[in-house]
């Protein structure tokens, strides 16, 4: 509870007590202390209802205050003797709002207020009995939309009105008028008390419902609980076994609570302490709501941490598999070049020498052999095209410049000389595939390759001025590259139009990924 709310509540109750005492003093003589006291008690009772409604239900605070005012005016103004009945009917049927939502309830309130203005209607015993029965009927029909304490309080109010009328009919002795007035006043005060108890219970249940409906998660838990409970000073602490204290989200220990505040401990998978206003935590439903919310939030937080750890492990495993595969590809490329490519090149050269020195009859056979060896060499070169080039060992920039050598189109390359080997291999294949697509399919005349590292992200952009219309299709080269990039926790996107295509790959890279 904030200081402003506490001050407002105290002010309302104090004002009610002073006003009720003053009007009762005006209405009754000094020797009629029992009449004075009961009259003031009614005003104070409705003032308490008004104060308890703040700050959540200002409409209820208004109607309760109006009931207290109407009662006190009836003590000093004969014409206003029954005004309180219209005000109380409004309170019962409208709570916690200032005006009823149901058409039937609105009609009943308007009727009660209208007949309360002149003292002649309620002053007739038969009319009072009829109106009391009508109030019971309206309360019964509207019970589903009434506040928690409105139905029992309303039934009690109808019984007080009917009882007063019956008493007047059965025992009209003027000597008993004062006794009847005291009993009636105590009955009206009981209506306010019953409504107050029901409203406080409703408020606690509503608070518990709000707590249970809060989103899961430990982040911002204290703030969410404080808003639901209506206590900005609420703090939640976890038990730190090393320091032997309860700590809040900022690592500050929970100090001993100030007067008016209390600590509630919850033992479960984790020990939790909640420091809040003692009045807010006095209701078992609110405490249970806090316990369930904190337990769910901490369990959600634990599962989130485990999930994040597992995802990190999976990402690292995928990265290790990719690095291992790249290393195997490099070894295979080297072996193919040394053990197959080099002998094939020597063989082609030897056959060409033999063709020049051979007889025409032998030349035809040798030419066919040279063609077969040449096709085998071309196939080997094509096979090596899917493997990283040897120049990649020298750095990313040399490998990308190697793509541009002998290209039929103009190629502009901007890249760091060296980056992490695993990242460099992925970036190279993205650039190579996008470069090949630009030449083969888009009929580009210019291809620009830009690789940059900024804020822990390696971004490769391959842009051409071709016909566009590129797309990522299942089984295609760009689709495989996307999977390769995503395996390193990166992302690949394609921007294409009639003016060209832009392929952008982004991969996370640590500062250590850029060698000095």
Image (spheres, rainbow, N blue to C red):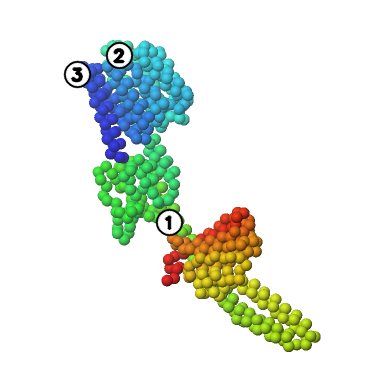
Rendered-image quadrant of the N terminus: top left
Q: Is residue 325 left or right of residue 34?
A: right
Is disc 2 placed on a helix, strand or loop?
helix
Mark nearest the camera among 2 and 3 is 2
Tell me how far mark 1 sits from mark 2, CA to CA: 68 Å
- Which residue position holds label 2? 78
- Which residue position holds label 3? 30
Q: Is residue 316 left or right of residue 479?
A: left
- Within 10 Å of the Cα at label 3, are there few (<14), some (14-19), or many (20+) other Cα atoms? few
For the residues labelled 1 and 2, say whether their Cβ atoms are less than 8 Å apart. no
Name which of mark 3 and mark 1 comes first in the sequence: 3
Name which of mark 1 and mark 2 comes first in the sequence: 2
**In the image, residue 286 above or below residue 472:** above
Q: Position of residue 234 (x, y in %)?
A: 33, 45
Q: Position of residue 50 (x, y in %)?
A: 33, 30
Q: Position of residue 123 (x, y in %)?
A: 36, 13
- Within 10 Å of the Cα at label 1, are there few (<14), some (14-19), or many (20+) other Cα atoms? some
- Which residue position holds label 1? 302
Name which of mark 2 and mark 3 comes first in the sequence: 3
């Amino acid at each position: 509870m904030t200081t402003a709310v506490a001050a407002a509540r105290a002010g309302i109750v104090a004002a009610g007590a002073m006003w009720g005492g003053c009007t009762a003093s005006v209405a009754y003589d000094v020797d009629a202390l029992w009449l004075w006291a009961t009259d003031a008690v009614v005003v104070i009772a409705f003032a308490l209802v008004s104060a308890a409604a703040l700050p959540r239900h200002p409409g209820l605070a208004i109607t309760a205050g109006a009931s207290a005012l109407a009662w006190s005016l009836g003590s000093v103004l004969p014409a206003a003797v029954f005004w309180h009945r219209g005000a109380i009917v409004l309170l019962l049927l409208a709570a916690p709002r200032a005006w009823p939502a149901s058409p039937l309830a609105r009609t009943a309130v308007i009727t009660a207020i209208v007949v309360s203005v002149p003292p002649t209607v309620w002053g007739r015993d038969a009319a009072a009995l009829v109106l009391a029965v009508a109030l019971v009927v309206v309360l019964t029909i509207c019970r589903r939309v009434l506040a928690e304490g409105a139905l029992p309080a309303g039934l009690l109010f109808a019984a007080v009105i009917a009882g007063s009328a019956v008493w007047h009919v059965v025992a009209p002795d003027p000597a008993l008028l004062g006794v009847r007035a005291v009993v009636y006043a105590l009955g009206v005060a009981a209506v306010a008390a019953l409504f107050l108890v029901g409203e406080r219970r409703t408020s606690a249940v509503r608070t518990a419902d709000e707590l249970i409906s809060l989103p899961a998660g430990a982040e911002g838990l204290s703030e969410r609980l404080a808003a639901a409970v209506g206590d900005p000073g609420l703090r939640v602490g976890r038990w730190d076994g090393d320091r032997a204290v309860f700590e809040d989200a900022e690592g500050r220990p929970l100090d001993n609570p100030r007067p008016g505040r209390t600590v509630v401990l919850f033992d479960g998978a984790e020990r939790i302490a909640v420091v809040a206003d003692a009045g807010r935590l006095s209701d078992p439903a609110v405490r249970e709501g806090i316990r369930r919310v904190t337990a769910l939030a901490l369990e959600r937080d634990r599962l989130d941490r485990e999930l994040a750890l597992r995802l990190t492990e999976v990402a690292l495993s995928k990265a290790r598999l990719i690095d291992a595969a790249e290393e195997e590809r490099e070894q295979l490329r080297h072996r193919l070049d040394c053990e197959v490519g080099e002998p094939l090149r020597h063989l082609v050269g030897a056959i060409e020498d033999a063709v020049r020195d051979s007889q025409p009859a032998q030349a035809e056979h040798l030419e066919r052999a040279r063609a077969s060896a040449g096709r085998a060499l071309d196939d080997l070169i094509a096979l090596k095209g899917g493997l990283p080039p040897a120049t990649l060992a020298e750095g990313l920039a040399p490998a990308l410049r190697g793509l541009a050598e002998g290209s039929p189109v103009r190629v502009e390359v901007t890249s760091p000389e060296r980056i992490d080997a695993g990242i460099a291999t992925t970036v190279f294949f993205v650039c190579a595939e996008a470069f090949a697509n630009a030449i083969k399919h888009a009929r580009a005349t210019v291809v620009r390759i830009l690789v940059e590292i900024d804020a822990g992200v390696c971004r490769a952009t391959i842009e051409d001025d071709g016909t566009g219309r590129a797309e990522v299709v299942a089984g295609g080269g760009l689709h495989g590259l996307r999977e390769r990039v995503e395996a390193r926790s990166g992302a690949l996107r394609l921007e294409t139009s009639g003016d060209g295509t832009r392929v952008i790959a982004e991969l996370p890279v640590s500062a250590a990924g850029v060698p000095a």
